[in-house]
Amino acid sequence: MIPRLKPQLDWRELAAALRPPRSDDVARFERAFAREMGQRHAVAFPYGRTGLALLLEAMGLRNAEVICPAYTCVVVPHAIVVSGNEPVFVDSSEADFNMDLDLAEAAISPRTGALVATSIFGYPVDLEKLEAIRSRHPALRVIQDCAHSFAAEWRGRAVQRAGDAAIFGLNISKLITSIFGGMVTTDDEVLAARLRDLRRQRVRAPSLAKSVRRLLYILAVYPTFWGPAYGLVNRLERRGLLDRFVKYYDDAAIDMPADYLEGLTAVEARVGIAQLRKYRGIVARRRSIAEFYGERLATLEWLQLPPRIEGATYSHYVPRVKDRGAVMTQALEAGVQLGEIIEYSVPEMAAYRGRAGASRPCPVAGQMARSTINLPVCGGLAGASRTVAALTGRRP
Ligand SMILES: *Cc1c(COP(=O)(O)O)cnc(C)c1O
C-alpha cells in the first residue's frame, strides 16, 4: 500500500536517535537550522505552536488581534489564543490556497498586532503584496508560517526571511522531521534574545521520560511505514484505533498538548540534524513528482489540478474533487491511500464559531476544506505512477 505520507527516514536518523546525548544537541540543531534557512537565529521549541505562542509574547502582544488564514492548521489559532490574543480569520485565494492578502489588509484594525502569512501546502506567499501591506502598516508584525513550506521561494526570494520571524513545525508529517518539535527563525537580534529569555522562563527542561517516549516513537515509525505493514496500519486508522497518535485536534476545544511547555529533547534535535542534510533532496524530489502529476492527470475532467507555482515546495499535492469520499475509496481499493488535509475551515469549527475573529465569511476556505485531496508525494516516482493508475483506472 502506498501511504499518504511517509517520513524520509533511514539508518542515518536511526543512528542519530540512538547515539548518546550531548549537552549541546539542541544548540547544534538550532545552528544547523538557521544556516539552512539563511537566518541569523533559530530557537527550538517542543512544538511549532509553542514557538508561535511565545513569539507573540516576545513581540509584546497581548489582547491584540492576530490575522491568520481561515484555511490553515488549527494549532495556529490555538497558539494565538493561548498567547492571550485573538485570531482574526481571513478567507483564501483561489489562486494558491493561501490567505487572500487584499482581504487580510482590509481586516487590519487599530487592535491588529500581527499577521501570520502561511505558505500553505508549500505555495509561497506573494511577497510583493505582503511588502506593500507592510509599508502601509509599519507597526504590523509579520510572522511567516513555514510549517508546510519551509524555504519556499516567491520569485527567487525565500519566504521565511520576509517577515519579522518565521515558525516551522517538525512532526513526522512535515517536509523534514525532528520527531516532534518546532523552530522559530529570525534575523532580529533583540527579538531572538527575548524569545530565548521567555523560553528559559517558561519551557522546562525535558524529562528523561519524555526522551524515552520520543525515542520509542521514532523507533515505532520505521515498521509503521514499512509497505507490507501499512495496510494493517490503514485498517486500524480507519476504525479510529490510532486516533491517539494521528488525531491532532478536537473540533470543540482550544487546547495544547500536555507537554507543550516541556523542551525539545536531544534525541529529537539529533534526528532533526540528520534530516536537515536531506532537506534539499527532499524538496527537489517533491517538485519533480508534482510535475509528473501535473502532466499525467491533466486530462481528468473530474479533478481540478493544483497550481504549478515556481518556488513551491509541495508539502502536499492537492487536487480538488467534488466527491472526495468516493475518490479516496477508489484509490484505496487500488492500494493507494489519499489524504484529505486540510479538511476544515477553522472559523467553521465548533471551538471558533461565534468568536469575534470568526465573523468574516470565508466561503473559499470552506470550499477548499470540502474538496481537497492529497496525493502521495513521498513514495517516489513508483508511488506516483501507482497513484496515477489508481485515479485514471488504468494499470501502471
Ligand atoms: C504543523 C503546522 C504548524 C505547527 O505545528 P506543531 O504541531 O505545533 O509543530 C503550524 N502551522 C501549520 C500550517 C502546520 O501545518
Image (cartoon, helix red, strand yellow):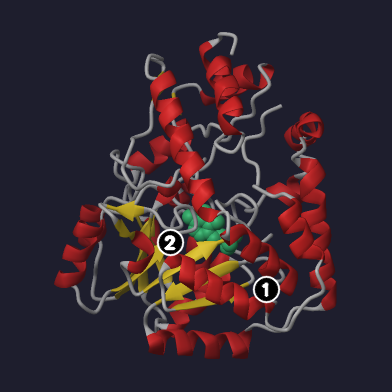
Q: Quadrant of residue 180?
A: bottom right
Disc 2 beta carbon < 8 A from ligand 1? yes
Q: What is the three-letter code of the residue carrying label 1? A: Leu
| Drawn side of residue 251 relative to residue 241, left or right | left
Residue 318 seen by the camera: no
| Drawn side of residue 236 relative to residue 361, left or right | right
Residue 346's tag is none
Residues at marks 2 and 1, CA–CA distance in whole angstroms: 19 Å
Q: What residue is pinned by disc 1?
A: 264
Q: Is residue 162 above or below residue 62?
A: above
Q: What is the three-letter code of the residue carrying label 2? A: Asp
Along the line of sight, which residue is nearer the eye, 308 or 8? 8
Q: Position of residue 7 (x, y in %)?
A: 65, 47
| Drawn side of residue 305 relative to residue 237, left or right | left
CB contact under 8 Å: marks 2 and 1: no
Q: What residue is pinned by disc 2?
A: 145
Secondary-structure class at tag 1:
loop
Name the quarter where the N terminus is drawn: top right
Q: Residue at x 78, y 60 (%)?
A: 15
